[in-house]
Image (tube, helix red, strand yellow):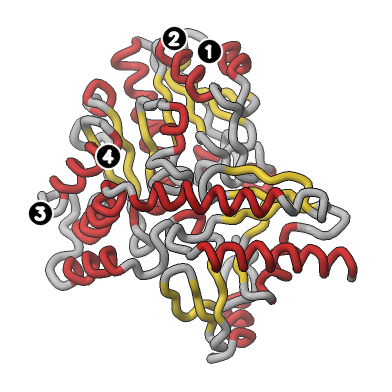
């Protein structure tokens, strides 16, 4: 098995079909570029759904991983290890929060936030046992566990996985009035993506997050911000909430926290929230392991310089400026913030997957979502020249599909 066709055939035959990958088999990657097993190079404009904000093989991150691999990889949380204190302190300082609870994947971090919010509701707010509710948004994507898909409005993620976990109220995204109407005495939290990535990179109106913060404070409920995709530099700020000067009660973090090397996730909150968790009530064998913490410590050091946030903001202006030029030429709408964009293609031209396949043939890797929308999120290390080249490939691919 050496060619793309052979490897794809075996993968399709021997694995569950829970993904529908583009027909490319990546073998090697550096920076913003990847190479397949047949030797063809592609510009990565997906970045592992923002897991690779700092590019493939960032030297500082790889060095930290290699050094830690040679010393210590796992202790479980039965013991302390020498990377843990630095991780909790560094991430706490980055988020401005007192305490950190580490996990592995983004979905685990969301589940952790849900558990913490419910326990806080019972022990601090005084909600009656088993009556806590959390307000969530239409079009959300927080992961694929059974609890999370219980409040998904995406049929693919939701249907035929019941019985579903109760305790959630779904309201329209970006409607503060809908949230206000859903709050009652049993509400313990609002769970929100500051930008909905899977839904098509939907950015709420200016002021929405600020109003949501004010509402949560006035009603005595927790604001939980799922910044798994939007956080850690992608939008031109450390967190997407920073664009409105909003600080949630709980940050949910993942993806880029692992530097594209290992799964690392965590929630960050102050002591009056996370202090309600005691030994035996929540945990993970691999959560906060030495390798994960060493990698995350390197990521935090990189973010502390502010270099990547500034670069994402600058390149984001280039990205959105050039994409807007395509509106009316096969593109209906462009959304996003920083180095992150959702591009709605005219459905008469093709589906998002058809556009993504046309881009792949031209050496650009992107991903479709919901019909004729594609997402662009190249590593923040991408050069301006390569970024403009990728958008030119999109323009050419659209023209080719339109005239074929």
Helix, strand or loop at mark 4:
helix
Q: Earlier in the sequence, mark 2 or mark 1?
A: 1
Residue nearest the viewer, comparing 374 with 335:
335
Q: Earlier in the sequence, mark 1 or mark 4?
A: 4
Q: Position of residue 183 (x, y in %)?
A: 53, 12
Mark 2 and mark 4 residues within 8 Å of each other at the beta carbon: no
What residue is shown at x 89% (from left), y 71% (from top)? 404
Q: Earlier in the sequence, mark 3 or mark 4?
A: 3
The label on residue 94 is 4
Q: Position of residue 236 (x, y in %)?
A: 45, 44
Helix, strand or loop at mark 1:
loop
Q: Is residue 350 depicted above or below 244 in this figure? A: below
Mark 3 and mark 4 residues within 8 Å of each other at the beta carbon: no
Residue nearest the viewer, comparing 78 with 163:
78
Mark 2 and mark 1 residues within 8 Å of each other at the beta carbon: yes
For marks 3 and 4, give the CA distance: 20 Å
What residue is shown at x 14% (from left), y 49% (from top)? 78
Mark 1 or 4: the one toward you: 4
The label on residue 82 is 3
Residue nearest the viewer, comparing 300 with 124:
300
Q: Which residue is mark 2?
A: 219
Helix, strand or loop at mark 2:
helix
Mark 1 and mark 4 residues within 8 Å of each other at the beta carbon: no
Q: Which residue is mark 1?
A: 183
Mark 3 or 4: the one toward you: 4
For marks 2 and 1, give the CA distance: 8 Å
């Amino acid at each position: 098995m050496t060619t793309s066709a052979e490897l794809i055939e075996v993968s399709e035959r021997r694995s569950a079909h829970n993904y529908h990958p583009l027909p490319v088999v990546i073998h090697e990657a550096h920076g913003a570029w990847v190479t397949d097993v047949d030797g063809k190079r592609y510009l990565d404009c997906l970045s592992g759904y923002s897991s690779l904000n700092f590019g493939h093989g960032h030297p500082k991150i790889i060095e930290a991983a290699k050094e830690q691999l040679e010393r210590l990889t796992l202790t479980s949380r039965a013991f302390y290890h020498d990377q843990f204190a630095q991780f909790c302190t560094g991430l706490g300082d980055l988020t401005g929060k007192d305490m950190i609870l580490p996990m592995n994947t983004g979905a685990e971090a969301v589940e952790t936030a849900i558990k913490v919010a419910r326990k806080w509701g019972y022990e601090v707010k005084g909600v009656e046992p088993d009556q806590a509710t959390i307000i969530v948004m239409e079009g959300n994507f927080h992961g694929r566990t059974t609890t999370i898909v219980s409040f998904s409005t995406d049929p693919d993620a939701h249907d035929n996985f019941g019985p579903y976990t109760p305790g959630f109220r779904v309201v329209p995204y970006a409607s503060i009035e809908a949230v206000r109407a859903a709050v009652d005495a049993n509400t313990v939290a609002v769970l929100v993506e500051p930008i909905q990535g899977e839904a098509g990179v939907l950015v709420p109106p200016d002021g929405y997050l600020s109003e949501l913060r004010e509402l949560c404070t006035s009603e005595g409920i927790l604001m939980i911000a799922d910044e798994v995709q939007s956080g850690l530099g992608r939008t031109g700020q450390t967190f997407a909430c920073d664009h409105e000067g909003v600080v949630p009660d709980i940050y949910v973090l993942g993806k880029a926290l692992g530097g594209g090397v290992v799964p690392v996730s965590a929630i960050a909150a102050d002591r009056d929230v996370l202090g309600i968790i005691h030994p035996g009530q929540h945990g993970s064998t691999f959560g906060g392991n030495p390798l994960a913490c060493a990698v995350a410590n390197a990521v935090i050091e990189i973010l502390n310089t502010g270099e990547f946030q500034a670069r994402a903001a600058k390149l984001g202006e280039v990205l959105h400026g050039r994409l807007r030029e395509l509106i009316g030429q096969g593109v209906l709408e462009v959304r996003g913030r920083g180095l992150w964009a959702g591009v709605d293609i005219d459905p008469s031209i093709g589906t998002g997957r058809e556009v993504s396949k046309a881009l792949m043939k031209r050496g650009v890797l992107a991903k479709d979502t919901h019909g004729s929308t594609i997402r662009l999120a190249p590593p923040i290390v991408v050069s301006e020249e390569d970024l403009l080249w990728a958008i030119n490939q999109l323009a050419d691919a659209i023209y080719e599909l339109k005239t074929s």
